Image: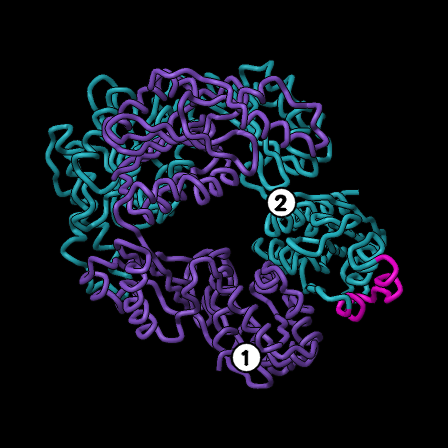
Chain colours: A purple, B cyan
Amino acid sequence: MTAELISVGTEILLGNIVNTNAAFLSQECAKLGLSVYHQCVVGDNEDRLLEALKMALKRSDIVILTGGLGPTKDDMTKAAVAKLVGRSIVMNEHSRQRIIEYFKGREDYTRVAENNWRQAEVIEGCIVVDNKNSIAPGEIIELPAGKRLILMPGPPNELKPMFRNDIGPYLAKLQEVVLYSEMVKVCGIGESMAETMVLDLIEGQENPTIAPYAKTAEVHFRVTARAASEEEGKQLVAPVVEELKKRFGDNVYTTKEEESLEEVVISLLKQQRKKIATAESITGGLIAATLINVPGASSVVDESFVTYSNEAKHKRLGVKEETLKSYGAVSEQTAKEMAEGICQATGADVGIAVTGIAGPDGGTPEKPVGLVYVGCCVEGKCEVEELRLKGNRQKIRDMVVVRALDFIRRGILQ
Amino acid sequence: MTAELISVGTEILLGNIVNTNAAFLSQECAKLGLSVYHQCVVGDNEDRLLEALKMALKRSDIVILTGGLGPTKDDMTKAAVAKLVGRSIVMNEHSRQRIIEYFKGREDYTRVAENNWRQAEVIEGCIVVDNKNSIAPGEIIELPAGKRLILMPGPPNELKPMFRNDIGPYLAKLQEVVLYSEMVKVCGIGESMAETMVLDLIEGQENPTIAPYAKTAEVHFRVTARAASEEEGKQLVAPVVEELKKRFGDNVYTTKEEESLEEVVISLLKQQRKKIATAESITGGLIAATLINVPGASSVVDESFVTYSNEAKHKRLGVKEETLKSYGAVSEQTAKEMAEGICQATGADVGIAVTGIAGPDGGTPEKPVGLVYVGCCVEGKCEVEELRLKGNRQKIRDMVVVRALDFIRRGILQ
């Protein structure tokens, strides 16, 4: 089956917002085995919306519309769809009750505008899909010849849960096959190298398929099988995931779709009851901030230091003046002393230290922009890694964070 | 004039990448006064691309195609366009020379594949636009009735400079009017409040127009005038910018398009020759990291502390145990002592301290998730601000960073 996405909203055509909904829905459709051949964006204009709708229904089985379900006169998705399918717009009592409930608990209860009730109106005969995060419901309109029109609200925090909870499962039931996928997340290895290492698998296989996704300093491989049941899907996917794990070894940090590298690091530290502290120069606190973004990080992070100047490296971490003078702040020796120093200063079991040149200025032929040293101490045992990264200041710093987190992970796994 | 965007690439239809090019080009077109009524995405498929092209050329004056100019057999934009306009594809000697130059300085010179030369081929009679960041040139094809097809490479780091340097100026010349705009960036005031404060201006005016853009804890207003010349545009925009500055007072942190809040803070600190240090709990280093992302931050930031645990707040910053016990870590008193403490511990002229509850756990009825205290000391003078923020962990932390930066800005402006 084919699906097509129509995003409605002048704010997208003005470039005021990036159309992340289209990327989300395309990914979800791909997971469900739906082929998406077209995405389009139209503004809050009935004629152009009708034109887009007609074309989409002609060439695709499922047409997913997002946006234009709000309360103002700019929101015309329902009116256009009603006109196209020749049905009327009716008040949906269930959705009206939900609006009352929604506003009850809020300060702005008195401010339920007349317009808000319009959001409880739906296309006659549609399947109403509750919006758990606001008041405009989704709608599924089943049409002759197996065609379907799906209307969803535009805000991502309403659209995403609605798709995951209701629309996705509805579409999955229409498919004769089940798509089952698992994710193998790899770091500490370049994108083209990672792809080369599994090129034979990617080229040779049809089911399951292996799709690589490049992230900052990471590569994720999605292994997807088409099968008659989820059980069969699992069986098809398992040996491929095993093969990927064999080839990438300890570069694989998780096979869980939703798990991030910092979450892996935090849960390893929790398991081993180890405390961590960071000593950051080039990243200026970004590693600590990334770790602390994981809920519950407080059980493994007490404190960290940003030591940007040479003096701070010396005073806070005990990096020897001699070391800074002979080897420079960006050196293997300094990174090592920083990592040792942060453990000593804070009593942490694990210390991670980074020093490098983020640019745009400050590079020399011997020490170019992108040269970074990462030091990691785990219970007194220290290692230093040299990185040579490419990119602008922000990109280099983001890559250092990932590489440093990976270095911690390897250090505590040893 | 109308413009339409066609993004070519199966990776967008699979949701593997977000179509940020469309948002960028839409914004640029809006700045040039071009009306964009359609954006669409098609995969690497000649039939569907031809269908999209035909429709676009029928309804729009300028059709901008991005992607599909690479060296592989998946890249078929040029072939489809050549077929549509009935011209042949010819080798462009200038672009061929550029490819030779491009690979000369690189290690992978020997790896210039036969396919790469295909990227020097262009549609007969087009205007060739150099790609300063890679090898596939852009192309402008002028057609009868004032229609134009513009081909650009897909990678954003190639597309953006090409548009800014060459394609944009080319399109600007086609317009009878000049669009001139300035940006007024506001923080420390909510989005709906900010809009309400200028609603009369937004509703009343036609030229210049005022368009609000909501950012994390900021609102940006773009003031745009259509005029016969840039000089006239400036004259039209000036009184509106003045009026916005009058209404928002010191909530306006810049009127420069490219200037960020952290850049303003860093340059104020540089001007006043003041050093800054942060003491971060809830943000875990993110404020320091944001400041240090500004090139040259090293002249005003020496070091900072992440003090996540109560013990660290006491030990590093001298927050009294009594204070932590009586008022708690998330309190006005603790924020104040943290800010004073970081100045004392580091000798910085300006100290910023944040403590709060980011969630999802840890909230109570008295101290809910989103409660944050920001303390700021400027040369001994301390102030504390209480924030009550809404959102998930990440969003709350991102908002705290902006509010803290703004608090620093106000503190050093006094």
Residue B262 picture location, percent across and down:
62, 48
Q: Amino acid at mark 1?
A: Tyr
Q: Is residue B312 magenta?
A: yes
Q: Is residue A235 above or below residue A50?
A: below
Secondary structure found at label 1: helix
Q: Quadrant of the N terminus of chain B?
A: top left
Q: Residue A282, percent across and down?
A: 56, 65
Specify start and end residues of the magenta stretch as a single range: B311-327
Q: Is residue A198 left or right of residue A106?
A: left
Q: Split into 4 quadrants, where in the image is the C terminus of chain B?
A: top right
- Is B276 placed left or right of A72 in the picture? right
* Alpha carbon separation for disc pair 2 and 1: 46 Å
Q: Is residue B102 magenta?
A: no
For residue A158, side relative to residue A151 (left or right): right
Q: Residues within 10 Å of mark 1 (few under 14, many from 20)?
A: few
**Which residue carries the number 2 mark?**
B391
Q: Nearer the viewer, residue A306 or B50?
A: B50
- Kindly check if marks 2 and 1 are in contact, taking CB atoms under 8 A apart as contact: no
Q: Which residue is mark 1?
A: A327
- Tell me which secondary structure the magenta stretch mostly adopts: helix
Q: Which label number is shown at residue A246?
A: none
Q: Which residue is nearer to you in this view: A268 or B161?
A: A268
Amino acid type at image mark 2: Gly
Depth check, mark 2 against mark 1: the one in front is 2
Query: On the image, which quarter does residue A340 sit in?
Result: bottom right
Does the image show residue A12? no
